[in-house]
Image: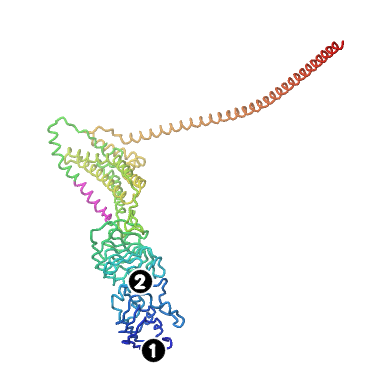
Amino acid sequence: VGFGNTPFLEVLELSNNLLTGNIPPEMALLSRVAVLDLTNNTLTGSIPSAIGVLVNAAVLVRGNDLTGGQNKDDEIVPPLEFNRDEFNWDEFAPPPQHKNDKLAPLSICANVHGFDLFHDPIWCPPERNVLRKFYYEAKGQEWTNSTGWVGEFNNHCKWHGVQCNEKGQIVSLKLMNGGLSGRISDEIGNLTSLEIIDLRDNDLKGSIPSTIGNLLNLSYLVISYNELTGNIPETFANLSELKLIHLHANRLRGTVPYLALKEGKSDSSFIADCGSPSDFDSTLSCPGCTMCCNANQECDVTKSQTPFVLISFIYIGSVVLALLLIATMLPAICNFICSFDKNATSTSNEIHAIGKDSVYSFFFSSSFTAWVPALAVLATQTLCFVFFINAASLDFGAETVWKYSFSCPRDSLSCRSDSDVSPVGWFFFTLFGVIHLTPDMLNGLKLVWGASKHGFTKKGLHIFIGGCFLFTITALALYATVVFNVATSRSDVEMIFNTVVLLFVNDLDEKMFTSLHTINSEWLEKITSEIAGSFRGNIKVDIQYAAANHELRDEQTRRIEQIEKKLLEKIMRVETEYEKLKTEYNKLKTEVKGLKARHTTKSIKIKTIQHTTKNIKIKTIQAIVIAENKKLQERSSRIRNRASNKKQG
């Protein structure tokens, strides 16, 4: 049939003609045909995929004995634009019969809307058309693995990454790390049976289709590590079956709808880019997330968000309230106990308890000028600790010193902790804390206890205030150290370093006392004398204890300097002696070399003399032997001559 010779044919009515054989692929040459009616014949084989170019025609094939086709190897799908005269139509002849598989060519089901089997789910499964659109919008030609995809007669349930249930409905689409680019097709919302979408670690761009909210059976949505932009669709709130959703490592903005995930939440079940720093001025808001990640792909669990500052106020308030209760209730308890022991005496020393070389002892003074530096140090320490606590609070919407301690690998659905803090680090933290803070906390309690025996007097009030401040600031130091280490320590070294830095702040009261002694020792001596005088009745203390204490320190410093000077002199003498010995050693070494040289020369001479003497002796002996041999020969000759003469006679 020369279909190419009838390019202007618009209607081809061949129904009810008892036609047999296969449908010729050359019918695709009827470029202007509006109706191609082949119904009610006995045509066999499969429908040629070439007819898929008749996008504006009504292709009618019902009432025949057609079957589905089977792809040839390296099948060529007809392009949307091609030269009909030069195209090789043999490539699109009906393929061999594939038993029990009625599938029309994908190109016809997708492009020819006038195909009378277009809405037949057996011949044209609608989900196959959806996947075809997904393939082209995600640039499937560039995928690293697209086995089976958009094959004309391939069952879409056998395409790479696609999984169907026993009813032939798509339930899983897993194309992670597959080289996908382009965008996610809006048509994905028509795969209503989908339970799993895993498109992580690709290069998908554009916005997230709002139609995903139509997938009411969706339980896993993983689209992390792409280049997706825009806002999170509000339709996500419809996904009531979700168990896991990963949206991180994209460029999303706005607010993620609250999602009540099924079967509880694990740390890795709901992840988004809601951490700081962010690629945008305002971070993504995610009230339901279990983990937030930042622009550096560092993550942390949202349950780590703790209002440390608020807790610190509650904590310090509770401490002060407890101290007040102790101060008000202990007098009765003390009187009751002391009634059984009349000879019981107080062994406490308030000045030593609060620290005789600390400005906190100024709280025992009646001078306002003495209270100023003490309150200044107390306020400075409090502000420092509050700054540390506030900076350590995890706020995903703002940048703080909190170090994110989790990472979420591309090839895993579970995040892992990157913290290297071991029990060794916590041991040293506890050790330093106990050694450094325990004495001040115990002394603070001792002062509060001691204030009770003075009753509601001026002295008792001063002792209570001093003990309360000492215990409170020490308790705040302990809380700040714990909080800051939890926030920033990700190794044992960091934990030890942070602990030492924070505990240094706790020593500001003693450093201030030393500074005052250096700046104005007379004023300091006056204040300490006034404090000691007020406690003379019940505490034995040297009025000049502060000055004496610093004089003792100066004396110790001078002694240390003298010892260092003597040691330096000894070191210099030792170095001088060492240089002398080194010189002597070099001399001896040179002499030894000379002796060795002379010894070698003499040895050579001796060996030469010995060799010469030996040669002379050998030659002398040889001469003697030769002479003796000669004598023997002469004697033998005479004897032979005599014997011969006798025989002749």
Looking at the picture, does residue 496 appear above or below residue 348? below
Relative to the observer, which residue lies in front, 247 or 13?
13
Residue range corresponding to the magenta coloring: 303-321
Relative to the observer, which residue lies in front, 6 or 449?
6
Q: Position of residue 369 (x, y in %)?
A: 28, 44
Q: Position of residue 614 (x, y in %)?
A: 72, 21
Which corner quadrant of the image does residue 410 belong to?
bottom left
- Per the picture, the main secondary structure of the magenta-coloured stretch is helix
Any part of residue 116 in sight: yes
Q: Amino acid at mark 2?
A: Asn
Mark 1 lies on residue: 9
**Going from the N terminus, do you reach mark 2 or mark 1 first?**
1
Which corner quadrant of the image does residue 631 belong to?
top right
Mark 2 lies on residue: 154
Q: Amino acid at mark 1?
A: Leu
> Residue 63 lies in magenta, yes or no?
no
Looking at the picture, does residue 360 appear above or below residue 180? above
Any part of residue 401 in sight: no
Q: Residues within 10 Å of mark 2 (few under 14, many from 20)?
A: many
Q: Position of residue 149 (x, y in %)?
A: 37, 70
